[in-house]
Amino acid sequence: MGKKILLVDDDDLIAIQLEAILGEDFVLAHAATASDGLVQARTMQPDMILLDVQLADLDGYSVCRRFKAEEGVAHIPVIFVSARTGLEDRLRGYEAGGQDYITKPFSAEELREKLKAMQQYIRQQRALQSLAQAAAKTANVALESAGDAGRILGFLRRAATLHAYPALAEAALSALSDYQLTASIQLRSREASWSFSHHGPCSPLEVSVLSNMANQDRIVDLGSRSAFNYPAVTLIIDNMPTDEPERYARIKDVAAMLAESVDIRMSTLGLYLATRERSERLLQILEHNSQVMTGIEQHHGQQRHASEQILGKLVKDIEDAFLHLGLSERQEFELQRMTRDAVQSAQDLYQDKVDTAAILHDLQQAIAQVKADLASDVLPQPVAPKADDIELF
């Protein structure tokens, strides 16, 4: 079927001439008035319009402006046909939105060449539009990919600061909410599992579905649902955009990256929590030992005080007994010396004891530091990216 041409001209003779010249190569329609021309342009959607400048009801320039102002026909090339040959008339045609200008009288060969050139122009325009659309589509895909990478990076940064499994699950579900997706997720450690959805903890049936899905392939499509399985994570998205192939593929990539990111964080979080638990147990042991050593120190002090009292009483009893023993002065002096030497030796034993007070003080300081480290999460854990790292969104 040939290209369609709409002729808007109130001269029937021109219509007959054009039919004779172009009838073999084109499908020609004729409108004698501006209003009829606009109606036919809407319904016929011709490949090009031949428009007379001097119409009975409205001049061709005004008609062309109406064509270009209407969205459904604005794209159709307009070729003015007129007996006016002046530059001013051509400029008016250009300003009105026309693509070419043919002066009357014209030859059949000239008309064919004009139409041939216009067809080439139309092909070029369509090719350019196609390239522009492809470039815009590529740019949009690139922007969307950068945005997706930025969201994943943002999730990783947030996940690095989370130290509880429920908080990690909530962060993953929140990230999916940015794509208007609803989902359920199950996190698994060696000791337990946790299952959540956007409305909170999963029901027993949801838990069962998540647990059974964990033994399936990495990605499983179930109609509008898709499941993503990793060793420590199962993610099920309930409302995949299956009617939008490009967005569907993009969402699958994002969901897979998100699930894998959660799986990686699960391993590091497990190590962190295990280290924290061991540190807390060690802290309990240290506190117990501190209490034991404090008790020993107190008991040691009590023994020392009791020994001093016993030895002091012994010295006094011996000195009081001198009155009844009948010892010579030299014997009394020698006995006093021996007694005092024994008392001093006993006291020296206590003076040579280990300085447990200093040890206890150092131990208590160490315990206080461990407590502070636990409170501020200084214990070994994954390091979050620096604030000045490159953003992808």
Image (cartoon, rainbow, N blue to C red):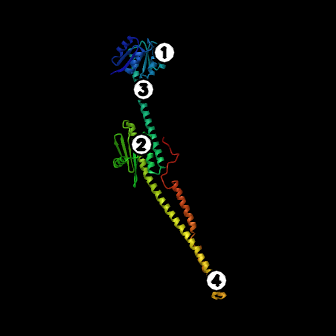
The numbered mark, 2 or 4, whose residue comes first in the sequence reads: 2
Residue 61 or 189: which is nearer the viewer? 189
Does residue 162 appear in the picture of this structure? yes
Residue 242 or 9: which is nearer the viewer? 242
Q: Relative to 64, is 285 above or below?
A: below
Residue at left offset 48%, top offset 47%: 158
The numbered mark, 4 or 1, whose residue comes first in the sequence reads: 1
Query: Disc 4 versus disc 1: distance between alpha carbons?
Result: 147 Å
* Residue type at the position of mark 4: Asp
Q: Does dot 3 land on a helix, a strand or a loop?
A: helix
Label 4 close to label 1 by CB (< 8 Å): no
Residue bearing the label numbered 1 = 89
Query: Disc 2 versus disc 4: distance between alpha carbons?
Result: 97 Å
The numbered mark, 4 or 3, whose residue comes first in the sequence reads: 3
Residue bearing the label numbered 2 = 254
Label 2 close to label 4 by CB (< 8 Å): no
Which is more foreground, mark 2 or mark 1? 2
Query: Disc 4 versus disc 3: distance between alpha carbons?
Result: 131 Å
Query: Disc 1 versus disc 3: distance between alpha carbons?
Result: 25 Å
